[in-house]
Amino acid sequence: MADEGLVEDFHAQTTPERHIPHPIVFWDETLRDGEQTPGVHFTPGEKLRLATIMSEMGISVINAGIPVVSAEEAEAVRLVAHAGLKAKILAAARTVPGDVDAVARSGATHIAIFVAASNVHLRYKLKMTQDDVLRAATNSVRQAKDAGLHVAFVTEDTVRAPFDFVERLYNAVKEAGADRLVIADTVGIMTPVTFRWYLREFRRRIAPTDWSVHCHNDFGLATANALTALEEGVTSPHVCVNGLGERAGNTPLEELALCLEKVYGVDTGLDLSRIYELSRLVEQISGVPVSATKAVVGYNAFSHEAGIHTHGILAHTLTYEPVQPEVVGRQRRMILGKHTGKAALVEKLKERGMELPDPVLVDLLQRLKASAEKRSKSELEAFLQEYRMLFEQPGMSDADFWKLVDEMGLGAKAS
Ligand code: MN
């Protein structure tokens, strides 16, 4: 395979110090954190459809949701948990007995118990002391273990919490039986360098054997931070298809998987050929469009227009493509436009078995460029206008919200 040549060439001239765990336990959060993307809602049937593909692709753990959120959410978790998928089905719970109970009743074999850890969360959101949190966390872990669940313990905002508290808390839940420890960079403030320090310190103080990271993309560093975590021996990275999730989202599955396989040369155990199919389905069901320039799954990720680039690609795809599009189930696109060169034109004409003399080719090229430069932008502008309106206020419209309030007869009381 031509694309493997690149990785080997690169590895031949570097001696990367990497100890990527094998196997990597991919923990997908699309159905939980991904569904928390503003305006996104998945039906139970949609969750099952997505979970089925993820499981077939080789994702190890799928977070199906938080059963106590609603009756429909509980139904969704039940549906996914009872579908007989190869992936382990996980559901999430706060450190509240009713939440843990709901997970145990859902049929999920895995639970993620979460509570905030940083001072700002404890003081302003939970109004709990560190001792309160520690007590609630250990009680919930014991309750889940007694129910026979595989227990992952998660703190929100782990990296902004005082390290001494993190040490005390994680050692206590480990003692209480937690199977997997999750570190969350909830607001995405880590960099590969600071995260490396953090993870080494965490390992020194807590000595986790099975640990996991939840990275957010507020500064565009989620993938880089997740890779750093794997380099430090973290076994289970959280991912979301298309990088869906709260605010700027989570580590995109497609970026992390492809980078590991093609840049690091690591076997992820994932069927990469279904990545694009899964991405398109998530885009459709979530209603969140993928950016054109998004790595791996963006519309332009395997498109070429510029003359120098298409010429190179036609000579050898490795010139301007680090990976063949077929690897992720995609096709290369050659775009005709202002930047087109002669080589692309010659190639295009072959579709009709045509071979034109050079002067005619030059004439055709000039007409093509002129036409591209004159192309009206009005259609695209109208589309963008509509697109922006849809995303200015995702979720329920103001009109629908106030209608709901009025239907409950609340307006009269307030005034
Ligand atoms: Mn999150």
Image (tube, grey):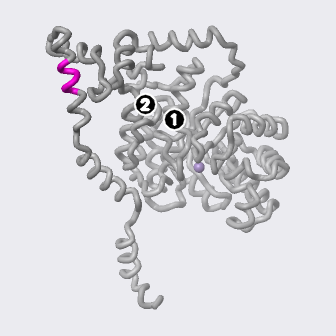
Label 2 environment density (alpha carbons within 10 Å; few <14, some 14–19, many ≥20): many
Q: Disc 2 marks which residue? A: 275
Separation of disc 1 and disc 2 at Cα?
9 Å
Quadrant where the image shows the C terminus: bottom left
The span picked out in magenta is: 363-368
Residue shown at the point (43%, 54%) measured from the top left: 40
For label 1, the SS is helix
The residue at the point 27 percent across, 16 percent down is 342
Foreground of the two, 378 or 370: 370
Report x, y in % for residue 396: 39, 65
Callout 1 environment at 10 Å: few (<14), some (14 to 19), or many (20+)?
A: many
Q: Which amino acid, by three-letter code, is at mark 1?
A: Leu
Q: Main secondary structure of the magenta part?
A: helix
Q: Position of residue 212 (x, y in %)?
A: 66, 38
Indicate left or right for 244 with 230 as reference: left
User: Which label was assigned to residue 20?
Assistant: none
Is disc 1 in contact with disc 2, using a CB cutoff of under 8 Å? yes
In the drawing, what numbered circle is on residue 253? 1
Residue 181: x percent and y percent?
Answer: 71, 42
The amino acid on which the numbered mark 2 sits, given as a three-letter code, is Ile
Residue located 63% across and 45% down the image: 149
From the viewer's perspective, tell me whether residue 53 is left or right of residue 148. left
